[in-house]
Amino acid sequence: MSDSLDRVLAYHRRTKHHFQRLAAGPHGLDWKNQPDPFRTFAGSPRLALPLLSDHEPAVGFDDVYQPGRGSPQSLTVAGLAALLELAFGLSAWKQYGDTRWALRCNPSSGNLHPTEAYVVVEGCAGIADGVHHYVSVDHALEHRCRFAAHAPTLPLGTFLIGLSSIHWREAWKYGERAYRYCQHDAGHAIAAIRYGAAVLGWRVRLLEAWGDGDIGTVLGTERDEDFGPAEREHPDLMVQVTTAPEAGSEPLCTPHAAVLAARNGRWQGKANPLSPTHSHRWPVVDEVALACTKPLTPDPTWEPPALPAPLPGHCTQSAVALIKQRRSAQAFDGATTISAAAFFRMLDMTLPRARTAPWDAIGWRPRIHLLLFVHRVESLSPGLYLFLRNPEAEATARSQLHSEFEWDAVDHCPEHFSLWRLATGDARNAARALSCRQDIAADGAFSLGMLAEYNTALAAGPWVYRQLFWEAGMIGQVLYLEAEAAGLQGTGIGCYFDDAVHELLSLDGEGLQSMYHFTVGRALTDTRLQTLPPYAHLQKGVGDK
């Protein structure tokens, strides 16, 4: 076993909660040093982007799952701006008394938003070629690197979106667990990009072959002179966005040309410090990030299985409206029962299908399965259920889970489901306890924990640890949007009582690991909160400033 993998495994064990003690974190929130939620680069020329309210695509939410629906929009400033707004833009401001904070389309642990987005673009009229940083609060692009005149770096009609994480934003609140939360948020962001692109008829693919060094060079995160005392960003991933009509399997961009263009380009701008001082240091976060460094690897070859078309949805809202109304629920009513059809639809959309958002953005087989705490779902007995997103995992799951579980097939569920009832009974107390004793996990119609195929996945390399969280975050974004589409709401719960989950299941060894919790129900509205429009401070129009 490599030293890097040893460090990853040790980090995972170290950052679990236990009922007797919690994972290491600050003993209180240092409000005077709360990180600025918005990174900017002073000295980088800005381009104000048009807002969706001026040209909203008329696409129903259910339509985003239809492969090849209509003609894709061409690559324009308006189209690129729409994607960035749907994936990373502000969806509203909330105000309570004198306190105001922004909500965004991409979910984030604690609304801390460690993820920064960059665009690498060429040949788009109105946007200079090069690397741009997206500033969500102003819906603007900062031109970080101006490419020199050279042979094209990217195929026609293609651009790249790169993501980085500022670990301090999460560590300020969550301490050593920050790395886990940052990776969850990267997964949320992948799915948010894919949903936004689907609205425009565009396709997205994670460039899994790229190494962190290449991504950092292209995004400029390794440039010491541009950060100085400011908190550093860790390169996470690069995705390719294709706007041209589908013509078979388009080639994936390799890093060489983009790296060369970035090295020969003219960089501009200095990052803003996010906190005056850091009252706590969490060196283990930097250590696990280093251990998870990804090298250049071969492109994946996995193909999703042939599945029936997705179960029908009955959402009548536009995709834009639904994406922008997504919220993390703060409390549920503890009474609402949902239909089996709505429940099955939510589960079905977590399954990968060819050419179907958001799962066609990644190229690995499902490694995350869902442990379901069913409270109030029509036609299903309350209890503990297991949904295997890859049926081939059944034998392994049966061998590792408690020998006294029922393993009863669920009546009337879709034939392509691998859904099993493990135990019948009231699961609300268990759901509450395993979700940091939060009532919301017991008050929803159902709650779930995500179980990762841990040892087998990490055998491919320690960087796969990140991908496990990305996959869990993508599931979370699917459930967020599908809950909204069903007239409900969801919320992710990054609570890591991992060993308590294992005890509940009597797991043998570390082959399966708990990664993330989520719950769905009917949200209670806090009437003391005001909801304000997201971009009222911006003037309409496009132009440099």
Image (cartoon, rainbow, N blue to C red):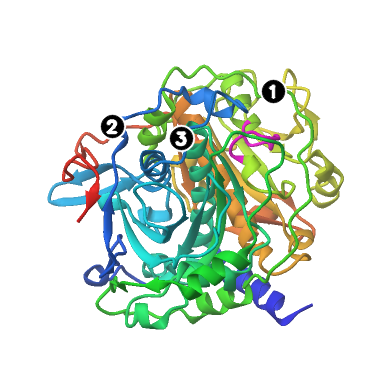
The magenta stretch is: 349-358
Can you give x and y, in whole percent of width and height, for residue 514 in the image? Answer: 64, 55
Residue 309's disc is 1
Asked if residue 127 can be seen in this view, the reply is yes
Mark 2 and mark 3: span between their CA atoms? 36 Å
Q: Which residue is mark 2?
A: 53
Q: Which residue is mark 3?
A: 443
In this picture, is 263 found above or below 53? Answer: below
Give SS at disc 1. loop
Mark 3 and mark 1: span between their CA atoms? 32 Å
Which circle, 2 or 1, is nearer the viewer?
2
Give SS at disc 3. helix
User: What residue type is disc 2 on?
Assistant: Ser
User: What residue type is disc 3 on?
Assistant: Asp
Q: Is residue 45 left or right of residue 132?
A: left
The quarter of the displayed image where residue 237 is located: bottom right
Give SS at disc 2. helix
Q: Is residue 19 left or right of residue 324?
A: right
Q: Nearer the viewer, residue 373 or 206?
A: 206
Q: Residues within 10 Å of mark 1 (few under 14, many from 20)?
A: few
On whether residue 362 falls in the magenta region, the answer is no
In this picture, is 406 found above or below 122? Answer: above
Q: Residues within 10 Å of mark 2 (few under 14, many from 20)?
A: few
Quadrant housing the C terminus: bottom left
Q: Residue at the left extreme?
A: 98
Can you give x and y, in whole percent of width and height, for residue 192 in the image? Answer: 48, 43
Asked if residue 177 can be seen in this view, the reply is no
Q: Earlier in the sequence, mark 2 or mark 3?
A: 2
Whether pointer 2 and pointer 3 mark residues with C-beta atoms closer than 8 Å, the reply is: no
